[in-house]
């Protein structure tokens, strides 16, 4: 729920003059420092990793952290926040397709019904019958965010069998921060005059701090806490409320409006994603990973 706030806050920061790449760089870098500092104080032993872990950590950081956030913020800069969130939340459909055609796992008919429903909703949101009236680059970036989010789930599922989620989150953020600083822009290169610039909801620097703290660090912390007490399928279904929250936040903070057909399409997309999630998750009571003090699961923040 906290991560849903990143879109409206980021859009205000970008309207003030920052690029999506600069917002992503600050978000990931600040979150990496907070995770690293917190883990060093609370559980420093979780910072110890093996050389063999780096391949997974690199993939997780490049795609599951840097990729998903960069693509999401590029989409937010060009299309309404609610649509950007809805596009990213087609990730469960992509995961289901990977499980079926790459892993060879037979999925129930409910999963395919959900896939068809989600694609129908996506077409309604994009209004494809009007020649993709929405910005094409924004739509492609939203789809890219979904692909990277699917990578997050798939890489994370594999990695969490032997690695602690706090270790994954910390090093994933560090890898993502380095990648963004090298490939896109370093966080220290942000223009000071823009950071101090006022927006309708506060100075730019406070928006960036809010994105890093509330939409990233606290979002991860709440996700892990929830997964310690609730089955993963329940938490994943609850996370589908985020696009609705983001759309409501964009309406309240940015006065963004969606047409009736786009709202119906968004609800249809969420319904399809709900079916895919339920059909693809293990039964309640079956734990994918042991729920101990050193093993839990985390979810991505946008």
Image (spheres, rainbow, N blue to C red):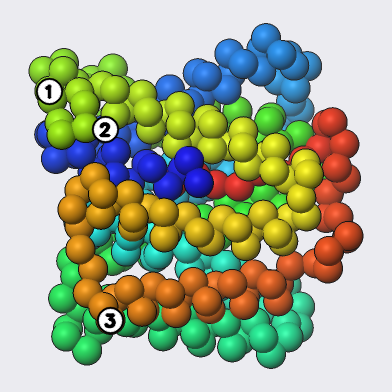
Q: Residues within 10 Å of mark 3 (few under 14, many from 20)?
A: some
Front residue of 274/185: it is: 274
Residue 208 found in image quarter: top left
Which residue is located at x 23 percent, y 68 percent?
258
**Residue extending farthest top:** 41
Which residue is located at x 32 percent, y 49 percent?
249
Q: Nearer the viewer, mark 2 or mark 3?
A: 3
Q: Nearer the viewer, mark 3 or mark 1?
A: 3
Residue 79 vs residue 90: left or right? left
- Residue 269 drawn at (x, y percent): 45, 75
- The disc placed on residue 261 is 3
Evaluate if marks 2 and 1 touch, with contact meaning CB atoms under 8 Å apart. no
Residue 28 vs residue 189: left or right? right
Q: CA distance from mark 2 to mark 1?
A: 15 Å
Tell me if residue 38 comes above or below residue 83 in the rendering. Answer: above
- The disc placed on residue 22 is 2
Evaluate if marks 3 and 1 touch, with contact meaning CB atoms under 8 Å apart. no
Residue 263 found in image quarter: bottom left
Residue identifier under label 1: 197
Residue 226 vs residue 249: left or right? right
- Residue 24 drawn at (x, y percent): 34, 36
Q: Secondary structure at mark 2?
A: helix
Tell me if residue 4 comes above or below residue 295 in the rendering. Answer: below
- Residue 167 drawn at (x, y percent): 69, 29
- The disc placed on residue 11 is none
Q: Secondary structure at mark 1?
A: loop
Is there any visible trace of residue 65 in the rendered image?
Answer: yes
Which residue is located at x 28 percent, y 81 percent?
261
User: Sequence order check: which comes first, mark 3 or mark 1?
Assistant: 1
């Amino acid at each position: 729920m906290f991560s849903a706030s990143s879109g409206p806050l980021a859009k205000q920061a970008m309207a003030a003059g920052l690029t999506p790449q600069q917002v992503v760089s600050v978000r990931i870098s600040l979150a990496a420092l907070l995770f690293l500092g917190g883990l060093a104080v609370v559980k420093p032993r979780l910072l110890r990793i093996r050389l063999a872990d780096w391949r997974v950590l690199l993939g997780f950081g490049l795609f599951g952290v840097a990729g998903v956030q960069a693509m999401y913020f590029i989409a937010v800069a060009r299309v309404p926040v609610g649509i950007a969130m809805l596009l990213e939340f087609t990730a469960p459909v992509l995961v289901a397709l990977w499980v079926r055609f790459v892993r060879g796992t037979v999925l129930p008919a409910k999963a395919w019904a959900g896939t068809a429903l989600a694609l129908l909703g996506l077409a309604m949101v994009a209004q494809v019958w009007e020649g993709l009236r929405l910005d094409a680059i924004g739509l492609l970036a939203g789809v890219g965010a979904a692909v990277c989010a699917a990578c997050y789930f798939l890489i994370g599922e594999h990695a969490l069998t032997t690695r602690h989620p706090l270790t994954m989150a910390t090093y994933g953020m560090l890898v993502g921060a380095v990648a963004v600083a090298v490939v896109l822009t370093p966080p220290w290169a942000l223009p000071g005059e823009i950071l101090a610039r006022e927006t309708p909801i506060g100075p730019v620097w406070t928006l960036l701090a809010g994105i890093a703290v509330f939409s990233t660090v606290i979002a991860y912390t709440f996700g892990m806490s929830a997964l310690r007490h609730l089955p993963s399928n329940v938490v994943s279904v609850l996370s589908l409320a985020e696009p609705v929250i983001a759309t409501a936040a964009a309406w309240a903070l940015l006065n963004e409006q969606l047409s009736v057909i786009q709202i119906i399409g968004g609800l249809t997309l969420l319904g399809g994603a709900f079916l895919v999630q339920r059909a693809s998750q293990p039964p309640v009571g079956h734990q994918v990973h042991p729920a101990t003090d050193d093993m839990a699961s985390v979810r991505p923040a946008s």
